[in-house]
């Protein structure tokens, strides 16, 4: 149901959003977590310094895992863009929940397809028609503080390695075998 | 070629590639100059060397058509494995933490290895025969394909793609093997078809690998494991094809070379001389550049296009792969089409028609590459990619419609150099336009299109004294600067005295059809004027 809020209308600009949510995560600066095992607990609430009624049109909160600038270097497919339709900073969904001003938390086990990189967490707030209206993030506006690392799984398995070795050996041995058998046959034909 | 019991003279392993001599039909059974040998028992009509005079695509008749099918499917398999990583790059780049330059370097590596392996394969075919050449290469590169499943770093990724790329030398064994089985009058079409259908593998892989990946993921594997398992399939294909080639194939129409005797001596040409005449002919180098801008950009695009569509238009992996596949699969008709239009124009306009044909097709491809780079809409991108593919692939076919006429003596070396030029062009374009992170892939495509258009212009400089060039007519002094003069100039006086240039003279006579409709190709004594029709 919440996926219908995925696509917004003609790209809201990130710079036009207000950071009205306070987002906190259980990670500390420079902490390293393992994909597939590590857990991150995220809490968020409305920033009381904003006037009452700011959150009158807030409906859904989407929490995402986002790349830190150092992990976007030389990787155009992770580039940040002010136009949120083209922005590729936040590529992993953590959780989607209805909006509440207080007492929001979620413990996320890091998925196995998350690559090794530096990250922060950001939450986007959507209104009733699916447009982004606000956000909150665990880092500062320059995305320099409170970043944490995730180490990806290798994807390698002993079973795969063994199979690869076996098939390779089969290939080489059967080739040599064929060659030797034919050479011997050729010799006996000519005798 | 099959003289000398299968051991050819230097460069002869490349002879088959370009033998687009006079007829471009699928059969020469009715050609009175080629007697049919009725004593031997083969399913197809054969000539005195037991080479088939007929090309029946859908037949599997042993040994000729079986060889054709084994040959093109081996080459096709190697294209599949060499470009197998390309559509999976969006997953691999996250697993191995690759940067844009890592991805670019791997792409360059994948096409560089075969520059050397193709040269070595020529010698291997001469020594061991094309059957073993092909099987050895396929079964020894199978382990490198399996190796991809335990790569864990950028360096490993680049190294494995480099090693898998060696397998593209099956192009040489393919063409060599065809030339032992098919008469030289139809070898042009035969080899054009094998080359085109083999190249298609670069397109099919863009669809095959993402589809397999999806299947394996649905079966429960995580993404970073699923792509590794996917690589087992091209690996198995290598082993299966290698075994089929060994089991069902034979080197020569009459059997395997090991069981046959040598057929006596043929005067061998000196490699140093062949190399000299190839290297000092300026046309060689123009065509090396040109082929880099047709086949070269085709290989480059095979490497970058799936990732491009995935990133730029936010498509799913399978969708991006399907679009990318249409690029490579156009080869099934586009490459032979280029050769066909070359022949059609040559009938009316001679060699000048062939040159114009090449320039038009290749520039057309380049222009649509520019459009592809600039377009922001998915539909226009797909359409321009298709026109780009047709232009580039037809140009590759058209190139080998001209190469046989550049030289007769050094045909093998020029074909080899041109082929290497293709791979080199691919490496160069990837290095220049798709490795640097400071500009996007779409900008890279734009620049590559501009490079294609600019670097195709040198075809205007290719001039044959006996046939002219794009803008200049042939020499007025047609008695002195004729075909015999051109091909004879590859032999010095000493060699001419020994009569070594007889083959070239015969070829010169036959090549008079490149003058276009004005001249009927008949035997003319050197000092009489040919009849004008």
Image: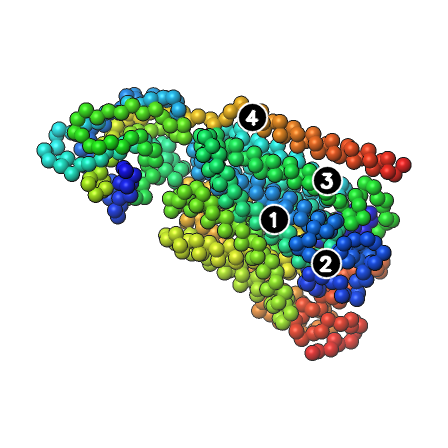
Look at discs 2 and 1 and give the one toward the viewer. Answer: 2
Q: Earlier in the sequence, mark 2 or mark 3?
A: 2
Asked if one can make out residue A19 in the rendered structure from this viewpoint, the answer is yes
- Residue shown at 61% from the left, 39% from the top: B237
Discs 1, 4: same chain:
no
Single out the residue that lies furthest toward the left: A52
Which of marks 1 and 3 precedes in the sequence? 1
Rendering coords of residue B444 (x, y %): 44, 48
Helix, strand or loop under label 3: helix
Determine which residue is flagged by label 1. B198
**Is residue B499 shown above or below B482?**
above
- Point 39% across, 52% down: residue: B378
User: What is the chain identity of the residue bearing mark 2?
Assistant: B
Q: Secondary structure at mark 2?
A: loop
Q: Label 3 lies in what chain?
A: B
Q: Categorize mark 2 by other alpha carbons within 10 Å: few (<14), some (14-19), many (20+).
A: many
Q: Chain of mark 4?
A: A
Q: Which residue is mark 4?
A: A161
Asked whether the beta carbons under mark 2 and mark 3 sit within 8 Å of each other, the answer is no
Q: Nearer the viewer, mark 4 or mark 2?
A: 2
Q: Which mark is residue B247?
A: 3
Quadrant of residue B399 in the image? Answer: bottom right
Instruction: Return the disc, 2 or 1, that comes first in the chain's sequence.
Output: 2
**x and y percentages locating residue B431 in the rendered image:** 50, 44
Whether residue A137 sits left or right of residue B335 in the image: it is: left
Crowding near the residue tagged with mark 4, few <14, some 14–19, many ≥20 C-alpha atoms within 10 Å: some
Of the pair B280 and B319, the residue shown nearer to us: B319
Observer-side mark, 4 or 3, equals 3
Residue B485 visible to the viewer? no
Where is residue B505 shown, x and y percent of the image?
Answer: 78, 63
Q: Label 3, label 1: how many angstroms apart (C-alpha)?
A: 21 Å
């Amino acid at each position: 149901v919440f996926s219908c809020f995925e696509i917004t209308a003609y790209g809201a600009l990130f710079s036009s959003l207000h950071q009205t949510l306070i987002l906190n995560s259980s990670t500390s600066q420079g902490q390293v977590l393992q994909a597939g095992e590590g857990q991150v607990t995220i809490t968020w609430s409305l920033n009381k310094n904003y006037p009452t009624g700011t959150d009158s049109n807030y409906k859904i909160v989407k929490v995402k895992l986002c790349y830190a600038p150092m992990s976007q270097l030389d990787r155009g497919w992770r580039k940040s863009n002010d136009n949120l339709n083209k922005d590729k900073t936040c590529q992993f969904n953590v959780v989607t929940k209805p909006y509440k001003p207080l007492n929001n938390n979620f413990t996320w086990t890091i998925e196995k397809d998350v690559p090794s990189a530096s990250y922060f967490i950001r939450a986007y707030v959507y209104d009733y028609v699916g447009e982004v209206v606000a956000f909150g993030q665990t880092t500062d506006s320059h995305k320099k503080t409170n970043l944490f690392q995730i180490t990806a799984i290798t994807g390698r398995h002993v079973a795969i390695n063994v199979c690869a070795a076996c098939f390779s050996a089969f290939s080489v041995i059967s080739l040599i075998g064929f060659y030797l058998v034919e050479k011997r046959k050729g010799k006996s034909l000519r005798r | 070629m099959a003289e000398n019991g299968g051991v050819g003279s230097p460069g002869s392993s490349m002879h088959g590639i370009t033998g687009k001599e006079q007829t471009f039909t699928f059969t020469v059974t009715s050609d009175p100059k080629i007697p049919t040998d009725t004593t031997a028992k083969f399913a197809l009509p054969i000539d005195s060397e037991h080479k088939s005079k007929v090309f029946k695509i859908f037949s599997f008749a042993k040994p000729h058509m079986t060889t054709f099918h084994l040959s093109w499917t081996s080459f096709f398999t190697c294209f599949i494995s060499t470009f197998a990583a390309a559509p999976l790059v969006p997953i691999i780049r996250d697993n191995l933490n690759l940067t844009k330059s890592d991805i670019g370097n791997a792409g360059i590596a994948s096409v560089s290895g075969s520059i050397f392996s193709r040269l070595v394969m020529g010698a291997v075919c001469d020594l061991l025969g094309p059957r073993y050449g092909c099987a050895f290469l396929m079964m020894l590169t199978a382990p490198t394909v399996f190796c991809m499943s335990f790569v864990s770093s950028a360096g490993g990724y680049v190294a494995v793609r480099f090693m898998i790329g060696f397998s593209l030398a099956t192009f040489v064994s393919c063409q060599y093997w065809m030339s032992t089985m098919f008469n030289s009058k139809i070898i042009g079409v035969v080899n054009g078809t094998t080359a085109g259908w083999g190249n298609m593998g670069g397109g099919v892989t863009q669809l095959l690998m993402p589809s397999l990946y999806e299947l394996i993921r649905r079966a429960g594997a995580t993404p970073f494991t699923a792509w590794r398992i996917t690589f087992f399939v091209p690996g198995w294909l290598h082993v299966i094809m290698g075994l089929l080639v060994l089991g069902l194939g034979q080197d020569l129409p009459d059997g395997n070379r090991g069981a046959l005797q040598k057929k006596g001596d043929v005067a061998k040409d000196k490699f140093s001389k062949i190399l000299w005449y190839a290297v000092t002919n300026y046309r060689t180098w123009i065509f090396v550049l040109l082929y880099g801008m047709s086949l070269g950009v085709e290989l480059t695009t095979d490497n970058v296009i799936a990732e491009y569509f995935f990133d730029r238009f936010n498509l799913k992996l399978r969708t991006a792969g399907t679009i990318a596949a249409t690029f490579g699969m156009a080869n099934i008709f586009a490459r032979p089409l280029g050769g066909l239009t070359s022949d059609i124009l040559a009938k009316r306009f001679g060699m000048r028609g062939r040159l114009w044909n090449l320039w038009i097709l290749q520039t057309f491809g380049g222009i649509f590459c520019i459009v592809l780079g600039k377009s922001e809409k998915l539909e226009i991108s797909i359409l321009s990619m298709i026109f780009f593919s047709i232009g580039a692939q037809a140009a590759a076919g058209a190139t080998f419609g001209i190469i046989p006429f550049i030289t007769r003596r050094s045909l093998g070396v020029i074909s080899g150099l041109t082929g290497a030029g293709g791979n080199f062009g691919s490496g160069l374009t990837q290095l220049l336009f798709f490795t640097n992170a400071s500009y996007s892939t779409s900008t890279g495509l734009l620049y590559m299109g501009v490079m294609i258009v600019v670097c195709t212009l040198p075809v205007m400089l290719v001039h044959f004294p006996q046939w002219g060039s794009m803008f200049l007519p042939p020499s007025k002094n047609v008695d002195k600067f004729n075909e015999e003069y051109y091909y004879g100039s590859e032999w010095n006086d000493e060699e001419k005295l020994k009569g070594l240039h007889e083959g070239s003279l015969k070829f010169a006579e036959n090549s008079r059809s490149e003058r276009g409709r004005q001249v009927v190709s008949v035997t003319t004594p050197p000092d009489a004027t040919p009849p004008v029709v």
